[in-house]
Structures are given as C-alpha cells and as structure tokens.
Amino acid sequence: MKIGKKIISENKPTVFIADIAANHDGNLNKAIDLIHSCAEAGADVAKFQHFEAETIVSDKGFRDLKNKKSHQAKWKKSIFETYREASLPLEWTKTLKKECDKANILFSTSPYSLDLVDYVDKYISFYKIGSGDITWHEILEKIIKKNKPLVLATGASTIKEVSLAVKKIEKIKKEYVLMQCNTNYTNSKSNLKFINLNVLKIYKKKFPKAILGLSDHTQGHATVLGAIALGARVIEKHYTLNNNLDGPDHAFSMNYDSWRDMILYSRDLEESLGKSKKKIEKNEFQTVILQRRSIRLNEDLKKGSILKRSNLICLRPCPNDAIQPYDIKKIIGKKININLSKHDYIKWKDLKK
C-alpha cells in the first residue's frame, strides 16, 4: 500500500501520523507551526480534521444528555461551541497542503461530512476514517468509491461492527489499514489496561488483507512499541506545541520531545525485530567459539586408545572444527589416531573411521 511516496508494508519502516486535529486553536499560523514542528520531530503525515459543528454534533442532543461525559467533562464550553471553535476553516486547506509540501511531509485530513469528502479529495493522498464513523456506512461507502488508500480506526466498536465495515472495504479495496484504538481521551494512565493490543492478533488472523495500525491516546511509548512488535505499521498520535494550552486535544497529545523519543525508540525496535529467519548472525561468529562447549579429554590418551564416556568432558571454547557435544554418543568406542593431552578438543579427523 502506498500513500504519497510512502510505502506501507511489513518490511518497511512504520509510518507515523501526527494528528493535529483541533490543536491549531483556530489560528492559521499555529497550524503552520504545528506542521513544521511535527515534520522536524519525525512525523510522516500531518493530519487535520475537516468538520463543521452543525454536521458533526447535535447541540440539542448533547444538551439533552445533561452532564458532559468522559474527556468532555473538562471542556469549559458546550459541546457544540467547542466543536465550532475547533473547526478548521476551509480556506486554510490549500495553504496547509502547501506548507506540508514545503516541510516534506504528507498532508491529510479526516472529513466528517459527505460534502467534505468531495471537498478534501483533491488535497489528500489517503483517507482516514475516525472511530466514531465506523457505523456510518454512508460516508464509508462514499470514501471507498474515491479509490484512494484508506485508514480505518476501530475504537469503541465490536468485532461485528468492524467486520461489517471491513466487508464493505474489501469489496473494492485490496489493501487498507485497520487500526486498533481506544477512544478514551482522559489522559489517565489507567487507560493502558483498556488498549488491548492483542486485538491486533485477531485482526491479522480475521482480516489478512489488512495492514495493521494503532491510533493511540495514552501516555508514554509502551502502546506504540507493543503495537509495532505485534505488526502495526501505521501509528497515529495527536500532536501539540504545548500540552498546557487550553483546548480539547492538547492534554493527551504528544509534543516535539515526546514525539522525537517515540520515533527513536520505534526505529530501534524495528531494527531489533529483524527478520523471521533463525540463524547464527555474523556478529555472533566469534561468540559461537567462546560460549559453546566442545568435547575434550579429561586425561592424557595415547594413539589407539578407545574413547570411553569417562575420558570425555564438555568445556568451552568450541573451535570451528571441534565435535559438538550433541555428537558425544557417536564417538564413544572410537579409536583416536593421534596422541592427545588433557583438555585437548577432539576433531573428527582425530578418530579412526
């Protein structure tokens, strides 16, 4: 699967999406600064969110809920007002795309209405569908028909709901990214126990065409590193310039330093994962000699002596031409054809055929 110039596969480096979301705080210059900051920190994609409050939330619906819930409980304004202030002006889109090009980073955005799917299409190389829209098949079908790479987050959903969405995707697309996700944005460390990275194993088995990914909102790097170890090749995390700023997304976002650390740790992990072939590596050639045991004599023996188990001892080191300890039974009863001293190692050529 390819997004822009980035190839996503098990054998390629993990692709990191910096979800800037609402962290621009309605300021175009801050949005531009976020693009260049995340690019410098090592992100591959700067992702925004295109929505209008009127087409993503119901003011009456949230007011009828009476009390704000989950992460929204900390929002100072109403849900509708918060979304309205967090929305991205359409006239910014062209500028943001140009700035991403300057920063050598892919521009992307999640459209949260049917009309916006059409609007953003010419600016993006792939679509990301957030967890909240996994059951809105109308927008899913519209995006699928755009015939561009697709990334689907699966937070707060059942395996049945994921399967229904995947079924629609696989009718048209051969490759797509399926992200495990937990949609609790409270920034509590206790959320780690709800991430369920092992779901990636289920996805790999149940949806073999999918490229695995993780959309994450937890502290630290454990979830990202664990996901990569389990096969995830696309990681999405929120990004901010300052975690102490007011706004719906700043608190649980990553900043330059934490993002940079995540990239460095992840690249180290990728390098250490290596390949699936078990062999003696070239940096182990000398330690094979140093750490393995060879079959040696525990006493002097003259030429023509017959080897008994009591004559033999297995000790380090093990030169390349030494007989391995697993062959010890094969040499018992054999005659040696040279004089050997105590602790000499035995070679096959030392034995009469």
Image (spheres, grey):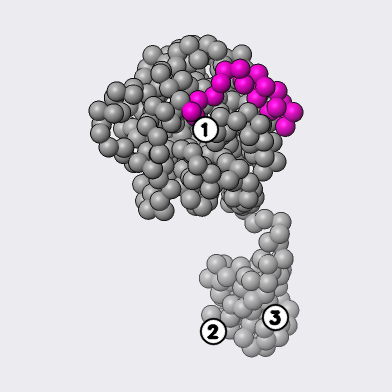
Task: Report if the CB atoms under discs 2 and 1 are less than 8 Å apart.
Answer: no
> Is residue 312 located in the magenta-colored stretch of the structure?
no
Query: Over which residues does the magenta segment extend?
Result: 85-104
Q: Amino acid at mark 3?
A: Asp
State the CA–CA distance, disc 3 to disc 2: 15 Å
How far apart are labels 1 and 3 at the CA level?
A: 73 Å
Q: Residue at x 57, y 33 (%)?
A: 24
Residue 302: where, in percent of width, then height? 69, 85
Q: Disc 1 designates what residue?
A: 22
Q: Viewer-nearest of labels 2 and 1? A: 1
Q: Quadrant of residue 304?
A: bottom right
At x 59%, y 77%, the residue is 314
Residue marked by disc 2: 310
Image position of 136 with respect to 330: above or below: above
Relative to 268, say whether 308 is above or below.
below
Q: Check the image and name the residue furthest to the bottom.
A: 299
The disc, 3 or 2, on the residue closer to the chain's N-terminal end is 2
Residue 281 left/right relative to 176: right
Say which quarter of the image contains residue 95. top right
The residue under label 3 is: 344
Mark 3 crowd level (few <14, some 14–19, many ≥20, 10 Å Cα): some
Can I make out residue 319 in this image?
yes
